[in-house]
Image: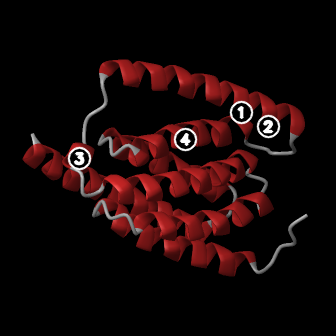
Amino acid sequence: MIERISPSFLEIFASLTGFVAIYFQIKAKPIYWPISIINVILYAIVFYQTRLYAETSLQIYYLLISIYGWIYWKKTNSSANFAISLCSKKLIIQLSIIGFMGWMFLAYILKKYTNTDVPYLDSFITSLSYIATYLLARKKIENWLLWIFIDFISIGLYYYKGLYFTIILFFALTILAIIGYKEWRKQLNVAT
């Protein structure tokens, strides 16, 4: 079991790496991914310590998708066919179904097998985050719209859990996601 090692320090450092990572995400730079790897490792510990188990599992997913995204972006970043793009209607429908099923599955697991006090909200945010991160790795502009929503509703969850530095991060992330959407929208318009 992970001991509580100065959780406020870990939370502060995780928040700071989150700010740095989001800057590079907005700029669509591959350096985003290794910084994200550091960020998710730190937040995995923070969320585990505060019994946000779905959020902890999300950090494991983030770690794996960060490795995938880093390799994929570096490999294809110079390629013109890896520009920012829109999701098809078919993909949106598929991801909506997957997201709903993931939410219900995670909520069931959390409610039945853990001592979390927020199984539905934790699993809802986590399920949407899985999808948003997948869309980010594929450079789909809709990832930003999901992040705006996810970051905003996460603020309430983190307030409830007393993660005050994380609230500051997620308030800023909500604003930065709006900026990121506008920035990627400009790049999308230039490409089309």
Q: Secondary structure at mark 3?
A: loop
Question: Crowding near pointer 4: few (<14 within 10 Å), some, many (20+)?
Answer: some
The image shows residue 124 at horizontal and vertical percentages of 60, 36
Q: Which residue is mark 1?
A: 106
Q: Secondary structure at mark 1?
A: helix
1 vs 4, front mark: 4
Cα distance between the residues tagged 1 and 4: 12 Å
Tag 3 or tag 1, which sits nearer the N-term?
3
Question: Up-down: is 23 above or below 186?
Answer: below
Question: Up-down: is 184 above or below 3?
Answer: above
Question: Up-down: is 183 above or below 124?
Answer: below
- Tag 3: residue type? Ala
For the point 31% across and 30% down, which residue is it?
A: 87
Cα distance between the residues tagged 4 and 2: 16 Å
Q: Which residue is mark 4?
A: 130
For the point 71% across and 33% down, which residue is it?
A: 106
The image shows residue 95 at horizontal and vertical percentages of 47, 26
- Tag 4: residue type? Tyr
Q: Which residue is mark 2?
A: 110
Q: Which residue is mark 3?
A: 83
- Tag 2: residue type? Leu
- Tag 1: residue type? Leu
Lateral position of residue 171 relative to residue 142, left or right: right
* Circles 4 and 2: CB atoms closer than 8 Å: no
Q: Secondary structure at mark 4?
A: helix
Question: Which of the labelled discs sits on residue 36, or is there none?
Answer: none
| Rendered-image quadrant of the N terminus | bottom right
Lateral position of residue 108 relative to residue 44, left or right: right
| Rendered-image quadrant of the C terminus | top left
